[in-house]
Amino acid sequence: MKKLFFLATMLAFVCNAAAQLPSVSLKDLSGKTVNTAELKNDGKPFIIDFFATWCKPCNRELDAIAEVYEDWQEETGVKIFAVSIDQAQNINKVKPLVDNHGWEYEVLLDPNSDFKRALGIQMIPYVLIVDGKGNIVYKHNGYTDGAEQELIEKVRELVKK
């Protein structure tokens, strides 16, 4: 019985730990270091969207969200962190792309894919929704037109709780 209790306790611990963001040091576009485990949005949900400058579906997704982002923020207070996985030699393409598209997201740089790897992400685009307590509550990879509606529905559900 003790072994079963120990296993159940360990499983609960592992499942709970897996739901939290890993601690990885990234830089934002201004060069400031950001610890991913400390990402937050004043107790409100936030979205982490992994992308690359060369990824057409990623850019379409971020463009589609940009069109409704202001409305989303007013309605739910949601914040978006866009995480570029462009490698070091292409990192200088990220800011011009963000500026050109007019994305109002907080952009983080993951040139070695440390954050992506820590989360077990294989393909991009990849989106996570994190609740106000820092728990990963939703994951989705790939993008099809209109998929952003599912994202905002999930965020609305969290805000209602």
Image (cartoon, rainbow, N blue to C red):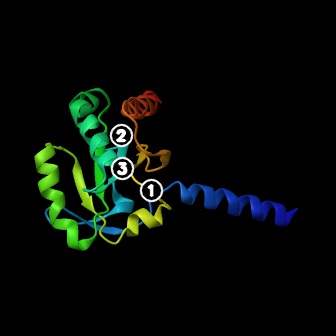
Q: Residue 139, which numbered label?
A: none
Residue 157 visible, this angle: yes
Where does the image place residue 145, in percent across and percent down from the top left?
Answer: 36, 32
Q: Are marks 1 and 2 in contact (CB under 8 Å)?
A: no
Q: Quick one: label 1, few (<14), some, or many (20+) residues within 10 Å?
A: few
- Dot 3 falls on a residue whose secondary structure is strand
- Residue 68: name its quadrant: top left
Q: Which residue is mark 3?
A: 48
Please tell me whether residue 144 is drawn above or below residue 53 in the rendered image.
above
Q: Which residue is mark 2?
A: 44
Residue type at mark 2 is Lys
Where does the image place residue 62, in percent across and percent down from the top left?
Answer: 27, 42
Q: Which residue is mark 1?
A: 123
Q: Nearer the viewer, residue 11 or 98?
A: 98
Q: Are marks 1 and 3 in contact (CB under 8 Å)?
A: no
Q: Earlier in the sequence, mark 1 or mark 2?
A: 2
- Residue 7: name its quadrant: bottom right
Q: Nearer the viewer, residue 19 or 113?
A: 113
